[in-house]
Image: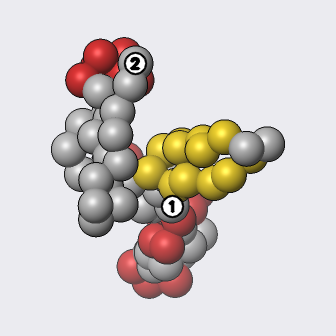
Amino acid sequence: MKTTISKKGQITVPKACRDRLGRRPGTVLDFEAVGGKLVGSKRVSEDVFRKWRGKGRLPGALGVDAYLARVRG
């Protein structure tokens, strides 16, 4: 497939490529030059849950097992 770089330095990724790779509007791509070729890859987003892990607090300063035993009856 072929595309042309615009005066502004923009390119259009051909629809067949976008469909085959599952790229949608808003997908962020990283580009790098590798061995004289331009390589674009989807940016891996950070884990959205990572910043919340370990932030929760159980009521009454109970341990996990004690809390589960209490709420389960």
Question: Who comes first in sequence, dot 2 or dot 1?
Answer: 2
- Residue 73 visible here: no
- Relative to residue 25, is residue 48 depicted above or below? below
The residue lying at 34 percent from left, 33 percent from top is: 3
In the image, is 69 to the left or to the right of 39?
left
Q: For mark 1, what is the residue?
A: 46
**Residue sitting nearer the eye, 2 or 54:** 2
The amino acid beneath tag 2 is Met
The amino acid beneath tag 1 is Glu
Q: Are marks 2 and 1 in contact (CB under 8 Å)?
A: no
**Label 2, label 1: how many angstroms apart (C-alpha)?**
31 Å
The answer to which image quadrant residue 70 occupies is: bottom left
Task: Tell me where residue 54 appears, x and y as whole percent.
Answer: 56, 73
Task: Tell me where residue 60 appears, x and y as whole percent.
Answer: 44, 83
In the image, is 48 to the left or to the right of 16?
right
The residue lying at 35 percent from left, 48 percent from top is: 5
**Residue sitting nearer the eye, 55 or 7:** 7
Task: Tell me where residue 40 appears, x and y as whole percent.
Answer: 53, 44
The answer to which image quadrant residue 8 occupies is: bottom left
Q: Residue furthest right?
A: 35
- Relative to residue 14, is residue 67 depicted above or below? below
**Mark 1: which secondary structure?**
loop
Task: Tell me where residue 33 appears, x and y as whole percent.
Answer: 68, 52
The residue lying at 66 percent from left, 40 percent from top is: 37
Q: For mark 2, what is the residue?
A: 1
